[in-house]
Amino acid sequence: MFSKLKAWKANKDVIKEHRDAPKSTNIHEEYHRAVRTKSYADFCNKAQLLANHPSKIKRFSEFLLEPDQETIPSILDSATFSNTPELKNIMLTYFDISAEASHICSNLLKGINQVHSDYQFFQRALDIDDGDSLESFELIIIELSSFIISSDPFSNLENHDFKLIHDKHSSVLHHLKSMRKRVGRKIKHLKRKIGGFKFSGSGSSLSKVYDQLDIAAKGTYIMNRDFDTMSRLVARLQDEIEHSRAMVQFCLDRKEDRVSMQIVKELKKSDFGFRKHVEELEEHVYLCLVTINRARALVIKEMKNSRP
């Protein structure tokens, strides 16, 4: 659990950059509390269990997304802004894009699971005590041969997926902030009209809509930053995998060459760093999934609280 909290430190910069965070509901505080709870650990265990069962792959992302996407339309229909198509559509888009983000995260978890599986051969090869003997080296070559024929663990997720999700997040964030600003102006106008009196009726409804838009905008902003980070982590990991494959292929092409033995030793030296990078990506994906679910839950909570 402590290792997973390290990834939280990187997200502190997001808090500093997003100056217009709502005072009443702070997603970062909710997020920070979430990663300390037993429910977060249970969520990670559930995701790992599902990732290890190929028969459930088809609905993998559905199991990880909370609340379920199928429940969203009925919740929106009962919300304060249900009779305002523009507001309803942008909130529906927000939930759609967060569901898509969760789906991409689940694909990343599948890829990471494959990395763990593929690297069992790689790890067994590196664990062999070569002792500079030809017999040990031949055993190493057998294990490396099994590793080299494995497929690309991230073939189900290309770089353009991150570009597309970034563009969608940016577009949704722009519309949420624009609408939030418009609602904010209406609230200020009403406050000038009624003076120091307490909001009621339409004024109270507008305030609740503003809070919902504010939370959705904050969640979208954090998701966008998280996905930018994951894009870089995936690219780095793919480069390392390709580099390892190239070195392994060199060993296989020159089995009797003493230089190949030296390359195996170099692979052993770099193995720890590689495994840390896999762990870092995995932790970030889990934290991103928690962010998505917490943001969705907070928006829905505001909607339910705003019902007459």
Image (cartoon, rainbow, N blue to C red):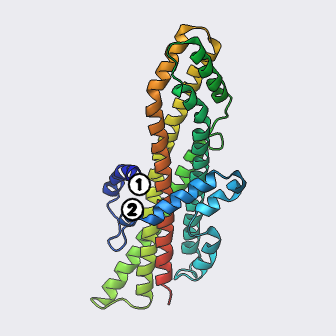
Q: Is residue 13 left or right of residue 211?
A: left
Q: Say what secondary structure mark 1 lies in.
A: loop
The residue nearer to you, when weighing 80 against 262, is 262
For the image shown, how many numbered marks are present on the structure? Answer: 2
Give me the residue at 61% from left, 69% from top.
Answer: 68
Give the residue pinned by disc 2. Answer: 36
Q: Which mark is residue 113?
A: none
Q: Say what secondary structure mark 2 lies in.
A: loop
The amino acid marked with disc number 2 is Arg
Give me the residue at 39% from left, 62% from top.
Answer: 36
Q: Considering only vertical position in the picture, is 85 above or below 138?
A: below
Give the residue pinned by disc 1. Answer: 1
User: Which of the image's four quarters has the N terminus?
Assistant: bottom left
Give me the residue at 61% from left, 8% from top.
Answer: 256
List x then y, in percent, for residue 243: 54, 25
List x then y, in percent, for residue 147: 63, 29
List x then y, in percent, for residue 190: 37, 84
List x then y, in percent, for residue 3: 39, 49
